[in-house]
Image (cartoon, rainbow, N blue to C red):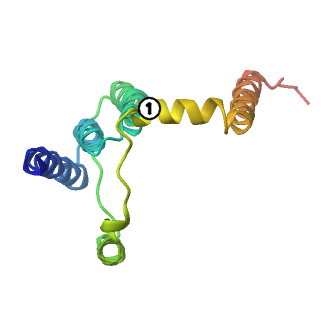
């Protein structure tokens, strides 16, 4: 049983690393954006394999459904305005390599210190989407509603601010 889950995990992990490498080394922003979609899809598949269905659906809805589509449309529309291909160049490769290696060392050290035996199993009668729904509508209802109202106020405020037009005066 464990081997049947490990094989897709390694496949999706390898694909996510491959797509992330394409993001890092491509000079075409549109190819990078499509590789970002592939990376997010592979990460969502890994979440599904880890039985974190809610996080996987959130990954798909927020990142793939919103941010990456917005990025792709922005790149495509910007490309049509200038009639040039959008090509990027890399700066600070040395500093980026130092930061990446140090982050890898810290994360690898943290993974080695995890006590995997202390992780409890999930109850069989409810999946985590049901558990999150029940918790959001019982114990965490007030913070959930406050967050919704704050986001609504921010949305209304941003539309009001973007709607202002300055009057030009001839003085």
In percent of width and height, residue 12 lies at: 16, 45
In percent of width and height, residue 136 lies at: 61, 34
- Vertical placement of residue 21 versus 69, above or below: below
Q: How many marks?
A: 1
- Quarter of the image where one finds residue 52: top left
- Residue matched to label 1: 129
- Residue positioned 37% across, 60% down in the render: 119
Looking at the image, which is closer to me, 151 or 55?
55
In percent of width and height, residue 68 lies at: 37, 34
In percent of width and height, residue 91 lies at: 33, 65
For mark 1, does the 10 Å Cα neighbourhood hold few (<14), some (14 to 19), or many (20 or more) residues? some
- Residue positioned 59% across, 36% down in the render: 135
- Residue positioned 38% across, 42% down in the render: 123
- Quarter of the image where one finds residue 160: top right
Residue 130 visible, this angle:
yes
- Vertical placement of residue 153 versus 18, above or below: above
């Amino acid at each position: 049983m464990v081997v049947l889950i490990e094989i897709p995990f390694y496949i999706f992990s390898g694909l996510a690393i491959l797509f992330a490498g394409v993001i890092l080394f491509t000079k075409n922003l549109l190819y990078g954006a499509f590789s970002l979609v592939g990376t997010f899809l592979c990460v969502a598949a890994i979440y599904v394999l880890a039985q974190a269905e809610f996080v996987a659906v959130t990954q798909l809805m927020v990142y793939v459904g919103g941010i990456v589509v917005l990025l792709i449309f922005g790149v495509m529309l910007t490309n049509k305005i200038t009639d040039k291909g959008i090509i990027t160049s890399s700066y600070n490769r040395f500093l980026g390599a130092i930061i990446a290696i140090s982050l890898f060392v810290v994360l690898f050290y943290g993974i080695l210190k995890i006590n995997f035996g202390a992780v409890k199993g999930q109850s069989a009668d409810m999946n985590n989407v049901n558990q999150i729904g029940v918790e959001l509508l019982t114990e965490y209802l007030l913070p959930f509603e406050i967050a919704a109202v704050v986001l609504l106020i921010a949305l209304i405020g941003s539309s009001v601010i973007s709607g202002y037009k300055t009057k030009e005066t001839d003085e």
